[in-house]
Amino acid sequence: MRTAGDIGAGLGLRLPSPLEPLHDDRLSRHGVRLLLKRDDLIHPDLPGNKWRKLRHNLAEARRAGHRTLLTFGGAYSNHIRATAAAGRLLGFDTIGVIRGEEHLPLNPVLAFAAGQGMRLTYLDRSTYRAKTDPAVVERLRREHGDFHLLPEGGSNALAVRGCAEIPAEIDVPYDVICCPCGTGGTLAGIAAGLRPGARAIGFAVLKGASFLAGEVARLQREAYGRTVGSWHVDLDHHCGGYARRTPELDRFIDDFARRHGMRLDRIYGAKMMLGVFALVADGRIPPGSTVVAVVTGRLDGE
Ligand SMILES: Cc1ncc(COP(=O)(O)O)c(C=O)c1O
């Protein structure tokens, strides 16, 4: 039997991902040390939390003898893109169920997915909202045959277990691990893997995401039967909502790129980093802390 330990063998994955200090006087003046956990460097097509979330799911799909992966996402979903790449690399057929109508020509994300061999199919928005209903899943099975189902965003109990492996790779003392938060799976896992005494902060990239704490707790219960670790969801740095931007965010990204030669992705990474700097400035991340910020996806412009 192939285990999760070897499903990625031969893919050239860079694991453990590098841990790099980031020197910035806006943090050092508060006595805070920041380390970047460069999960973006794990694999060009399976970067960041994508490999973490897929790893045990792919092993389980293989163990169960499934030849096909089916998953859901919006037309710009990083998860759709990564699932398509994982399928090609590991020999699974893949089906991407996309929210809304087909638009041609395909955007770059869906064109990439199709290029990897993913079969794309579309659900109108109201059916898409009901995608977890047994009747909708059954209809998909009738149309496409048997498959291993990955939820939207890839967040399920196995994904949480994969994300819990991030803290285990950190071999220096730390106080806080930070990540962006979309569906909550990454935070749920990181929090479960924390060393004793440390805490995790997830920065919501959506507006009005007070539901996210419940989602993180639900995912942890699904994975471990209980909630685990010290964590919370920061709701103050979404910059207007999903994929929205503010002049402050744009300025922060440009300035960060000038200082550090690194262009943070504006949907996830930049909002987390903006939040980290704000919490350091106002003391909610106190002086003397070592903070690890997880780079959960590709940098912009790559
Ligand atoms: C690059 C990137 N970072 C962070 C997230 C948020 O992770 P999660 O959905 O597990 O909260 C996503 C979405 O999956 C993502 O694509």
Image (cartoon, rainbow, N blue to C red):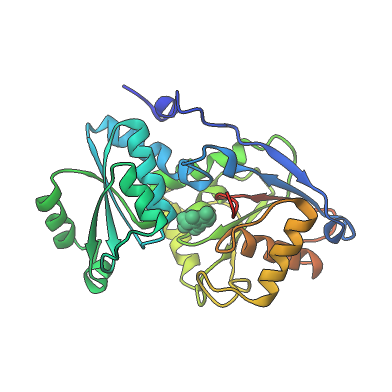
Residue placed most toward the observer, 100 or 193: 100
Using residue 301 as the reference point, say whether residue 220 is left or right of it.
Answer: left
Residue 60 lies, in percent from the top left, at 32, 35
Residue 245 lies, in percent from the top left, at 59, 73
Residue placed most toward the observer, 277 or 113: 113
Residue at image point 33% right, 38% down: 87
Quadrant position of residue 32 = bottom right
Quadrant position of residue 134 = bottom left
Whether residue 129 is situated above or below residue 170 in the rendered picture? below
Residue at image point 45% right, 61% down: 183
Q: Can you see residue 156?
A: no
Residue farthest to the right?
29
Residue at image point 41% right, 55% down: 108
Residue placed most toward the observer, 108 or 95: 108
Residue farthest to the left?
142
Residue placed most toward the observer, 299 or 171: 299
Using residue 296 as the reference point, say whether residue 79 is left or right of it.
Answer: left
Whether residue 208 is situated above or below residue 91 in the rendered picture? below
Residue 197 lies, in percent from the top left, at 69, 49
Residue 161 lies, in percent from the top left, at 46, 42
Quadrant position of residue 269 = bottom right
Q: Can you see residue 109?
A: yes
Residue at image point 46% right, 46% down: 50
